[in-house]
Image: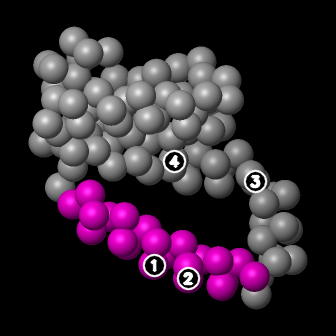
Amino acid sequence: MDDLLRRRSSFEVIGLRGSFNESIKHLETHIEHLGLKCRVKVDLKGAIAQGGILGTFIGAASLPVGVALAAVATVACTGHTLATYNPDYEIIKDYVNKKLKVVYKK
């Protein structure tokens, strides 16, 4: 991993089982140790695709709560995006496929 980060490569970490937060913290520490910035995101497209019709019914049932939570999440996401403006790396969490995508952005 250190070699890939030093070479500014994009890569994937696959086969994670319940250790997403530890793995992300480990990656963030290494990236910041090299003097680079990173942003952590969630792969929502994959999660929505896996949710399918069940997600639609659950979403419709909780629409008022969902709208309020979406507003709060949008504000939080905007703040996070500004705090990590122009990152060197993006770490994308893919819960469905149990992997992390580490993408070099510059």
Q: CA distance from mark 1 to mark 4?
A: 18 Å
Disc 4 marks which residue?
43
User: Up-down: is 28 above or below 55?
Assistant: above
Q: Position of residue 12 (x, y in %)?
A: 41, 24
Q: Is residue 56 left or right of residue 11?
A: right
Q: Residues within 10 Å of mark 2 (few under 14, many from 20)?
A: few
Q: CA distance from mark 3 to mark 1?
A: 26 Å
Q: CA distance from mark 2 to mark 4?
A: 19 Å
Residue in the picture at 14% in, 36% down: 35
Instruction: Check whether the beta carbons of the residues at disc 1 and disc 2 lie within 8 A of each other.
Output: yes
User: Up-down: is 33 above or below 55?
Assistant: above
Disc 1 marks which residue?
75
Which quadrant of the view contains residue 64?
bottom right
**Residue 42 appears in the figure:** yes
Q: Describe the element under mark 3 as helix, strand or loop.
A: helix
Q: Is residue 38 left or right of residue 52?
A: left
Instruction: Check whether the beta carbons of the residues at disc 4 and disc 3 lie within 8 A of each other.
Output: no
Disc 2 marks which residue?
71
Q: Amino acid at mark 2?
A: Ala
Sequence-wise, the earlier of marks 2 and 3 is 3
Q: Residues within 10 Å of mark 1 (few under 14, many from 20)?
A: few
Q: In the depicted view, which residue is nearer to us: 71 or 49?
A: 71
Q: The C terminus lies in which quarter of the figure?
A: top left
Q: Residues within 10 Å of mark 4 (few under 14, many from 20)?
A: some
Q: Nearer the viewer, mark 4 or mark 3?
A: 4
User: Up-down: is 40 above or below 102?
Assistant: below
Q: Amino acid at mark 4?
A: Asp
Image: magenta residue range:
65-85
Sequence-wise, the earlier of marks 3 and 1 is 3
Q: Describe the element under mark 4 as helix, strand or loop.
A: loop
